[in-house]
Image (cartoon, helix red, strand yellow):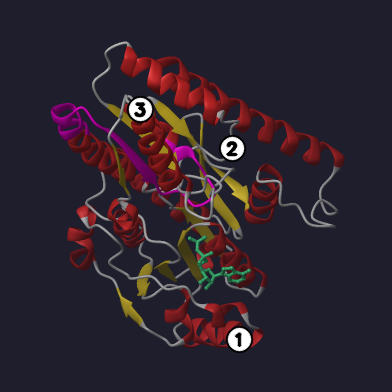
Amino acid sequence: MANTIKKIGVLTSGGDAPGMSTAVRAVALAALKQGIEVVAIYEGYKGLIYNNIKPLKNTDVLNFINAGGTTLLSDRCDEFKTEEGMAKAIATCKEENIDAIIAIGGDGTFRGATDLSHRGIPTIGIPATIDNDITSTDYALGFDTAMNTNLMLGDRLRDTCWSHARCNVIEIMGRGAGYLALQSGIALGATIVAIPECDFDEEAAIAKLKAARANGQRSFIIAVAEGFPEKDGVPYGEYLTKRINTETKAEGAWIDTKFCRPAHMVRGGAPTLRDRLMAAQFAEKAVELILAGKSDCVVCARNGEIVETDISYALILDRMYKGKLKDGDLDKFSEEQVEAMKAFCAMRKAELDKMYALANLLA
Ligand code: ADP
């Protein structure tokens, strides 16, 4: 199998993340060095369906190293999920003599990678999402850059909050996951951090805020994950802002509180050092796996090592962690594997709880 790979395709898909382009560059350079042809598939899986494909040479990718967004563009392509769309994608691979694919993205992208692998196009996934919520890997590309953007924005809010003795609630992206809000919150010295995965006592949080003000604290930052359940029909961060203003004003000890939603601003920007290094390591491993004849797996960071995991295992592990297992999901796994998955999920939750305790300790 190893020497049958002559041409690989690389694509980025789903939500964009800083570091995607860096990974494309590294995939291309690592493969070209081995004498493998590389083609760029534009706009994710849509480019496979509509044959939006161009060869990549060394000189094409040099400036990909610090590109924000994704130079190969992305798309959320529902057609790819249909049998017809999949058949077109496979036909394009045959037409273009693409022997294998490296797909950079999140869990949706990995589902697509599995479908391709099962239809004879070996595909390897590289994790990339600013949410860093892919359970099987300690790290996904884009997370560090997004956190640094949160720091830059949050530090600016801190300056003006201090000047005017204010509080600022920042709603931090992450879909259903609170990693980005939690770690950014710690790094911003947030007085309150609210994430969906951990218990949050609103009354205690408000009491803490008021006590800190009474004790002389001039300004405050509050980090709320976008995935925290909404209240009174509005996103939780907006609700909390309103409650603090209304309540403290009525009590004659107003904590002037503003709301900020950086939203997609944190998706852009040049990748940080960490994202560039991780992109390089993930890409090197992905090319190595492709050349070793592997298929249907995702590269993962674990305790400082870059390892591989079967996509089906990674996806089910993810569902288990997020409490979204469906009937039959565990059927094809042995008892030992299921136990290992449960232990892994418990380890992930313990990691998160520890970090959340730290956020509260330092708040
Ligand atoms: P992400 O990869 O960031 O999680 P999405 O969930 O939007 O983003 O998935 C990206 C793309 O992957 C989708 O637009 C679609 O083309 C493909 N995809 C997602 N889910 C599936 C699936 N179940 N089967 C095949 N392809 C899928």
Position of the C terminus, as image quadrant, is top left
Q: Residue 73, can we see it?
A: yes
Q: Residues within 10 Å of mark 3 (few under 14, many from 20)?
A: many
Seen in the picture, residue 317 relative to 254 is either above or below; the reply is below
Q: For numbered disc 3, what is the local secondary structure?
A: loop
The answer to whether marks 1 and 3 mark residues whose Cβ atoms lie closer than 8 Å is no
Marks 2/1: CA–CA distance: 39 Å
Which residue is at 41% across, 47% downward? 238
Q: Position of residue 30 (x, y in %)?
A: 34, 55
Seen in the picture, residue 124 relative to 76 is either above or below; the reply is above
Q: Earlier in the sequence, mark 2 or mark 3?
A: 3
- Tell me the kind of residue under disc 1: Ala
In the rendered view, does 340 fall on the left or right side of 235?
A: right
Residue segment shown in magenta: 158-181
In the rendered view, does 171 fall on the left or right side of 116?
A: left
Q: Earlier in the sequence, mark 2 or mark 1?
A: 1
Marks 2/3: CA–CA distance: 18 Å
Residue lying farthest to the top in this orientation: 215
Number of the label disc, if any, that sits on residue 87: 1
Residue tagged by mark 3?
190
Q: For numbered disc 2, what is the local secondary structure?
A: loop
Residue tagged by mark 2?
197
Q: Position of residue 115 (x, y in %)?
A: 63, 70
Position of the N terminus, as image quadrant, is bottom right
Marks 1/3: CA–CA distance: 50 Å
- Tell me the kind of residue under disc 2: Glu
- Tell me the kind of residue under disc 3: Ala
